[in-house]
Image: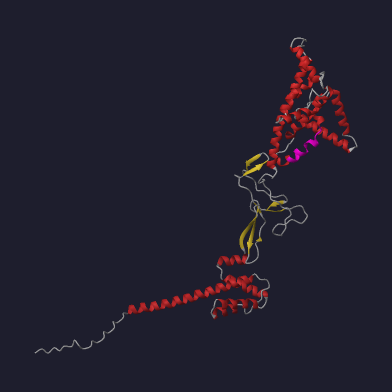
Amino acid sequence: MDINADVSSYPKAAALPAQQSVIGQIGQFQQLESNRIGIDQQKLNLMNAHFNVMNKELSNLANMPGITKDVVLQRMHAIGDTFNMPAPVRQQMESEFANANTPQQVQQQLDFVIRRGMDTQQRINSLYGAPGSVDNGQTVTPTRQGLRGGPVPVAPPIQTQLPPSTQVPTPGGVQTLGSQQPQVPAGAAPIPGGLPGQYQPSQPTTNLPVTPPAGSGAAIKPAGPMASYPPTFDAGVKQYSMDQDNAVQRSTALKPILQALPLIEGLRTGPGTDTWNKGIAFLKANGIVNIDPQSDPTAVYQEVNKKLSQYVQNSGSRSDAQQALNEESSPNAKTQIQPALIKLVKDQIALDRVQIARPTAFNSQDFSKYGQHRSTFPQHMDERAFGLDLMKPDERQKLVTAMSKNLQSKNPAEVANAKRFFDSLRIAKTQNFYSGE
């Protein structure tokens, strides 16, 4: 007999929960504790953020002159409401200003609150000033930057210099600067034990930055090589080159007229002489009239005309009309009688020599000054000094004697004219236009 009962239809009892181990319980506790610490850390970070926001606002208030405690508290309440700061933060910040009753005390407390958010180096800089410098391109002045206000000079300026490899313009052209001794401005002296280039006034003062007495004329100015040519330097170089080219052209043009001058002596010139000489030349060319092989006047006349025409052509005329105009205004054997022709030839030679001497009379390498020299040179010259070699000895001696006498005159105009004559004569000698005494 089977005595086993069928219990499959009976409800089953619930399974008992597994017993948690001690290690599991410790892990669960640690997780809960970690969550709590994380929450506390977030609260602390939020509080620090609130303090930072408040510190930034107080930093702005610190730069307001005559700030009062009421203004500070009013602004702190506004910031607290805006960022929903908790009561402990507000109370802590307000308590720090409880005993700040004067503007000076408020300012000191503001400085303390601002420094609290700084690291160690920032605190040192706020107390003693952050080291720095002011560089104006010519001097570097050591400074300290405090918590507020601008940089304060703490030492005399240091003169800066260009590196040795710098290409700098000089009167002789662009050159490499090379090594230099420290440049000290006029009216200044090196500081004993100071850095190279550091200077102070020749008469030291306790004021910083260094400031010379007003009206003393001892202003300290940076010294050193020039950094660029003056604005008129390039224009002066171009003008100088143009005048040099003109001098070469006029020197070449003068050769024929200088050769013609001694031939004019004793020659018949003027109106009608051209027709006459052409007729005589026809007769001589066809053997009707004999030709003097030594000094035939007809041949001399033709030679003079040729050389005077060469002078006009070499003067740089570019058009027929201009050349014709230059020929009419230049010495011409066909239209001018002999005395006038000789005088005009000598005057033309002297005037051309003045222009030839203009560039070489400039005795400076600073071409920025050449424009002034160029525009005033003709007025400062006496063309008679450039034609002394063309004068007869008695005429030359008479002129030099008269000018020497005028130097001793009591008449300022005569003295000025005499000085201009001898200055011109000195230049004429340097150009080899005259070699006499």
Image coords of residue 24 (percent x, y): 33, 78
Q: Answer above or below: position of 331 versus 69.
A: above
Q: Which is more toward the observer, 313 or 254?
A: 313
Count of numbered labels shown in the rendering = 0
| Majority secondary structure of magenta residues | helix
Image coords of residue 187 (percent x, y): 73, 51
Any magenta on residue 236? no
Q: Quadrant of the N terminus?
A: bottom left
Image quadrant where residue 366 sits: top right
Q: Answer above or below: position of 132 versus 417.
A: below
Q: Is residue 338 visible?
A: yes
Give the left or right position of residue 107, taking residue 333 as reference: left
Image coords of residue 230 (percent x, y): 69, 45
Residue located farthest toward the left when viewing the structure as drawn: 1
Q: Quadrant of the C terminus?
A: top right
Image quadrant where residue 436 sits: top right
Q: Which is more toward the observer, 115 or 79?
A: 79
Q: How is the image coloured?
A: secondary structure
Residue drawn at x 53%, y 73% as measured from the top left: 49
Q: Answer above or below: position of 218 versus 292.
A: below
Residue drawn at x 74%, y 11% as measured from the top left: 286
Give the left or right position of residue 82, taking residue 375 as reference: left
- Magenta-colored span: 371-382
Image quadrant where residue 19 sits: bottom left
Q: Is residue 366 visible?
A: no
